[in-house]
Image (cartoon, rainbow, N blue to C red):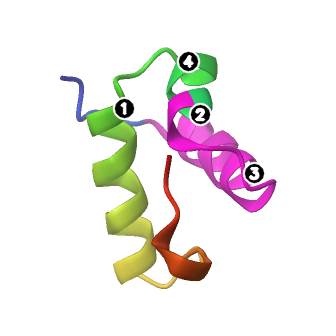
Amino acid sequence: MDFFWDSKEINMFEILWNRELPISEIAEILGKTEISVLFLSMDRILKEKIEPRKGWCLW
């Protein structure tokens, strides 16, 4: 798993998240594992940088 994210990747993640793409698609687009994207999503939610999805629908 790759837990290193640069600011460009984080910005792209947030754009894709706000488009409500599933984590599996975000991972594929960014070349990351689904687990890495899951951890980033939890981090960004806890830091109030993104909104959790209704029903916590991640995949």
Q: Is residue 23 above or below residue 2?
A: below
Q: Earlier in the sequence, mark 3 or mark 1?
A: 3
Residue marked by disc 1: 34
At x 44% / y 68%, what residue is drawn? Answer: 44
Residue marked by disc 4: 28
Q: Are marks 4 and 2 in contact (CB under 8 Å)?
A: yes
Label 2 Cα crowd, 10 Å radius (few <14 / some 14-19 / many 20+): many
Q: Earlier in the sequence, mark 4 or mark 3?
A: 3
Image quadrant in which you'd find residue 54: bottom right
Q: Quadrant of the N terminus?
A: top left
In the image, what residue type sits under mark 4? Answer: Glu
Q: Earlier in the sequence, mark 4 or mark 1?
A: 4
In the image, what residue type sits under mark 2? Answer: Ile
Question: In terms of secondary structure, what is the magenta stretch mainly?
Answer: helix
Q: Is residue 55 left or right of residue 46?
A: right
In the image, what residue type sits under mark 1? Answer: Glu
Residue furthest right in the image: 19
Task: Kindly report the distance in space between the C-alpha atoms of the residues bearing marks 3 and 1.
Answer: 17 Å
Q: Is residue 5 left or right of residue 31?
A: left
Residue marked by disc 2: 26
Residue marked by disc 3: 15
20 drawn magenta: yes
Magenta stretch in the rendered image? 6-24
Image quadrant in which you'd find residue 36: top left
Q: Earlier in the sequence, mark 3 or mark 2?
A: 3
